[in-house]
Image (cartoon, rainbow, N blue to C red):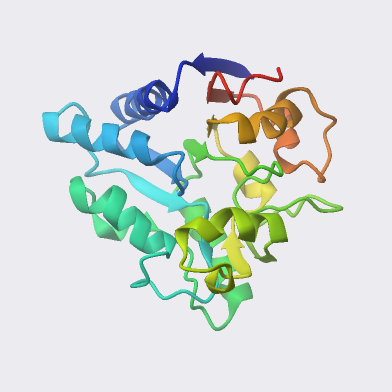
Amino acid sequence: MKIIITKNHEEMSRKAAALVASQMILKPESVLGFATGSTPEGMYQKLIEANKKGDIDFSKIKTFNLDEYYGLEKENPQSYYYFMQDKLFNHVNMDPQNTHIPNGMAEDTEKECREYEEKIEKAGGIDLQILGIGNNSHIGFNEPDTEFVRDTHLVGLNEDTIQANARFFESEEEVPTQALTMGIGTIMKSKKIVLMASGKGKADAIYNTVKGEISPEAPSSILQLHRDVILVIDQEAASKL
């Protein structure tokens, strides 16, 4: 596990974008795993800028998102489908056929999750997976649990996750209580993982990731077993290491 500590969110975004750009340049047909939320927003902006300059090309890139709220339509501004279009896909030369996000309106969630796994496998697996992290050490929407769930699945969101995400909605009651998420096994199959975190609120989670006991009660701790993980975190998130 390699740790890059940055001064602030801006520098974190720039360094993470450089890692993604390097992957794209070395392998123009890379399969990238993307995350949503406020943490990677700056990174996406840097990638848009690099694309407009002609430094990176999205035309052959395939993407798979970590997760999607269950019960939100694509057109909902709080859906992760909407987020990805707004923050990245609409601004680069990405082939829409090459972007994949779980269908939050799927009637048969087991089938949707199974087919999502099959699509990742058919694409050759994820070359580089971007992760954020929750205050409770969740990655994707894999919440603290008694076991690691391997594959993409429907999950109930913990109360603290719902509260943390309430800032994006008009009220806490509007926050979905379930999501479709890649499983821990799916994430761990990625050839390279870049985890981003900023702020004091993530310090405990980063400590658990790096130095904590490997346990499903702190899902991110499993990353200690991955062969190629880079943490790009600011000084506040790194404060307890």
Quarter of image, res 221: top right
Residue 3 vertical position relative to residue 196 in the rendered view, above or below: above
Quarter of image, res 43: top left
Q: Give the residue displayed 58% in from the left and 23% down from the top.
A: 236
Q: Give the residue displayed 59% in from the left and 16% down from the top.
A: 2
- Give the image location of residue 200, x and y in percent: 61, 30
Question: Which quarter of the image is occupied by the C terminus?
Answer: top right
Check the image and name the residue furthest to the bottom. 107
Residue 188 vertical position relative to residue 110 in the rendered view, above or below: above
In the drawing, does residue 219 fall left or right of residue 88? right
Question: Which quarter of the image is occupied by the N terminus?
Answer: top right
- Give the image location of residue 99, x and y in percent: 35, 55
Q: Is residue 158 visible?
A: no
Q: Give the residue displayed 31% in from the left and 43% down from the top.
A: 61
Q: Give the residue displayed 26% in from the left and 43% down from the top.
A: 60
The front one of 23 and 79 is 79
The front one of 61 and 83 is 83
- Give the image location of residue 51, x and y in percent: 19, 34
Check the image and name the residue furthest to the left. 53
- Give the image location of residue 227, x and y in percent: 65, 24
Residue 73 vertical position relative to residue 114 in the rendered view, above or below: below
Q: Is residue 40 visible?
A: yes
In the drawing, does residue 134 fall left or right of residue 99? right
In the drawing, does residue 31 fall left or right of residue 25? right
Residue 236 vertical position relative to residue 218 in the rendered view, above or below: above
- Count of all numbered marks drawn on residues in the image: 0
